[in-house]
């Protein structure tokens, strides 16, 4: 279907940036490419700027923020830049001069303002800019490979002159999460040189990595478009994890194979203009140098090298989660997790399960793809189940209009442009739908509310500060809706609220879910269940490739159960996509 990916396709530029949603295989693909180029005699530096990096796990060596040679791979060096640490230093630099001069409540708000994902990404950009501006480092390598590229939003923001002016220090326009960038003002010229290098097609290739599923391809299209608009046009797309064959009488094997092919028939138009390659779905975990080399050479491991380890314990299914919430009369249930892990399906299944237990349930989502419509299409609902969707676009548009209408008329066009770009940040969407969330949660007095995705701990803390409440939620009247006042205390009350973290039994989804849990813990919200979704280990597949991957899941199932969660349930990869109320009931009997 697509030409198999080889490093020859991207080896004509010095800088290679790998980007894509969490869990699509950016790190393993970047590592395998680095090892392959090094084995061919090229001097290669591999750099990760991912806050949830598992580069050390993949290469099986401890890394620091300074390039170090990788044992057993001549010509390969690697470093693991820590953007979280860089973000902490950045916050200290910005806030330090105000300590002892401003009230603690103001300092707390400032710190939270600078704790969002966008600030971390700015700090990550600063880290690899430092590396790219060091000519002695750049000239020492034939290729520098970056695991994780900056988003188009961040790069657009940094191109605006007002980002460096410091006007935000006294602005009350309500910047969603970036805060003043003046702390990095001395880097402006270096940043400009980095932007120039990124846009130079002779020096830089952007490698988009996606899974052969609809949501992953849509995310790749968005990233491709955003980055193309700011001049990064030398792009390649890797469809990672593409099944090469199927076993027709194995339901899991044939279903996954056909599902992937159907997704590729819907590949977005924007991506059809990008050179596209594929990498196979392999039977082994892509950790360790031996396995990384297999990816580009053999595609499968010899049968003798696979094992059949079994967990010493069994995990409950989704029905146990539903029984727990029903018995304890939990009024508000959130499913949370990164994109592509199946939050919407799990929320739908929990809602149906609670209805079948005799509860009146309202199910809502902020999913922009309106996946709930797909789950329940052409389906007659039980009278005790109602469904709604909070439209993020409508909420964001209304929020932007409100913010911009209150912006000082004294600001120039560049300042307005900065505010508009800042309002395109991911945190803005969370804040914009916050009020809608609060109204829906208020309904839990009369019915159980199941919500697909929720505000992050960072956003909740940002809005918890009195000044942020006033600034973000009551700009025109100074009044805070009762539903908003009561929301955070309600979310913190385990007798009322149950948070379910949904993940896959793979490195990046588990590591990112761990960071999400830390974020929630900062907001004094403790997830009650972890749900390992789409597990091959929990199936009885006979497909040798899928059986190999099932074994690779064990490491991450153990990490969740032994280190991260209080209660864990597991849901097998299903042979069919379950749509409709009755089909969802059947799904519950198998999960």
Image: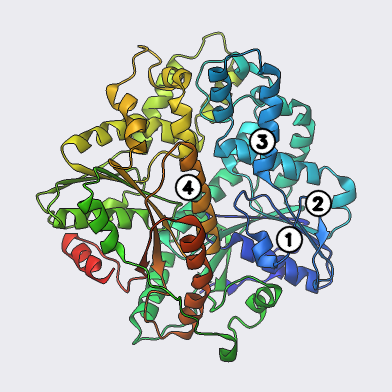
Say which residue appears at 20% left-offset and 68% top-offset: 586
Comparing 8 with 341, the one in front is 341
- CA gap between label 3 and label 2 equals 18 Å
| Residue 525 in view of the camera | yes
Q: Position of residue 247 (x, y in %)?
A: 40, 86
Q: Which circle's residue, 3 or 1, is located before the other in the chain?
A: 1
Q: Position of residue 520 (x, y in %)?
A: 46, 42
Q: Which residue is mark 1?
A: 62
Mark 1 or mark 4: whose residue is earlier in sequence: 1
Identify the disc placed on residue 66: 2
Given contact means CB atoms under 8 Å apart, are the residues at marks 2 and 1 in contact?
no
Q: Is residue 295 above or below residue 557?
A: below
Residue matched to label 4 = 517
Q: Are marks 4 and 3 in contact (CB under 8 Å)?
A: no
Q: Is residue 268 visible?
A: no
Alpha-carbon distance for marks 1 and 4?
Answer: 25 Å
Q: Residue furthest left?
A: 383
Q: Nearer the viewer, mark 2 or mark 4?
A: 4
Q: Residues within 10 Å of mark 2 (few under 14, many from 20)?
A: few
- Foreground tag (2 vs 1): 1
């Amino acid at each position: 279907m697509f030409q198999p990916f080889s490093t020859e396709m991207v080896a004509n530029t010095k800088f290679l940036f790998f980007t894509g949603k969490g869990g699509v295989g950016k790190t393993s693909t970047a590592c395998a490419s680095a090892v392959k180029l090094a084995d061919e005699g090229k001097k290669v530096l591999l750099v990760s700027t991912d806050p949830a990096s598992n580069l050390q796990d993949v290469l099986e060596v401890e890394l620091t923020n300074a390039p170090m040679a990788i044992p057993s791979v001549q010509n390969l060096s690697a470093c693991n830049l820590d953007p979280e640490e860089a973000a902490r230093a950045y916050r200290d630099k910005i806030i330090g001069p105000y300590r002892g001069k401003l009230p603690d409540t103001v300092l707390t708000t400032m710190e939270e303002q600078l704790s969002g994902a966008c600030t971390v990404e700015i700090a990550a950009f600063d880290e690899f800019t430092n590396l790219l501006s060091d000519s002695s480092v750049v000239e020492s390598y034939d290729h520098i490979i970056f695991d994780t590229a900056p988003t188009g939003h961040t790069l657009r923001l940094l191109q605006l002159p007002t980002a460096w002016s410091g006007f935000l220090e006294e602005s009350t326009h309500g910047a969603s999460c970036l805060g003043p960038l003046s702390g990095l003002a001395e880097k402006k010229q270096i940043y400009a040189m980095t932007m120039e290098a990124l846009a130079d097609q002779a020096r830089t290739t952007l490698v988009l990595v996606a899974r052969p599923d609809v949501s992953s391809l849509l995310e790749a299209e968005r990233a491709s478009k955003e980055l193309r608009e700011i001049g990064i046009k030398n792009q390649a797309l890797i469809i990672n994890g593409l099944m090469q064959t199927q076993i027709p009488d194995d339901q899991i094997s044939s279903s996954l194979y056909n599902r992937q092919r159907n997704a590729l028939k819907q590949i977005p138009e924007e991506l059809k203009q990008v050179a596209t390659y594929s990498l196979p779905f392999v039977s082994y975990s892509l950790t360790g140098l031996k396995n990384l080399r297999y990816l580009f050479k053999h595609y499968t491991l010899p049968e003798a090298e696979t094992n059949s380890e079994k967990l010493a314990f069994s995990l409950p299914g989704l029905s146990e989660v539903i029984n727990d919430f029903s018995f304890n009369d939990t009024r508000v249930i959130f499913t949370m997790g990164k994109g592509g892990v199946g939050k919407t399906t799990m929320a739908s299944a929990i809602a149906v399960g609670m209805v079948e237990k005799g509860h009146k349930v309202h199910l809502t989502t902020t999913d922009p793809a309106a996946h709930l419509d797909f789950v329940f299409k052409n389906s007659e609902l039980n009278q005790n189940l109602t469904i709604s969707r909070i439209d993020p676009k409508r909420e964001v548009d209304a929020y932007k209009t409100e913010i911009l209408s209150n912006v000082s008329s004294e600001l120039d066009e560049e300042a307005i442009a900065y505010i508009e770009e800042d309002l395109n940040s991911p945190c803005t969407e969370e804040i914009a739908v916050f009020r809608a969330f609060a109204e829906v949660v208020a309904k839990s007095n009369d019915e159980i509310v199941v919500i697909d995705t929720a505000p992050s701990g960072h956003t909740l803390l940002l809005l918890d500060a009195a000044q942020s409440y006033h600034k973000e939620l009551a700009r025109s009247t100074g009044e805070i809706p009762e539903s908003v006042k009561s929301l955070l205390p309600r979310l913190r009350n385990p007798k009322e609220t149950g948070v379910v973290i949904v993940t896959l039994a793979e490195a990046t989804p588990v590591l990112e879910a761990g960071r999400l849990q830390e974020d929630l813990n900062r907001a004094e919200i403790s997830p009650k269940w972890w749900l390992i979704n789409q597990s091959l280990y929990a199936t009885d597949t006979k497909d040798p490739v899928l059986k190999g991957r099932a074994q690779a899941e064990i490491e991450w199932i153990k990490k969740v159960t032994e280190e991260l969660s209080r209660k864990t349930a597991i849901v097998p990869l299903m042979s069919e996509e379950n749509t409709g109320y009755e089909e969802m009931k059947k799904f519950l009997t198998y999960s």
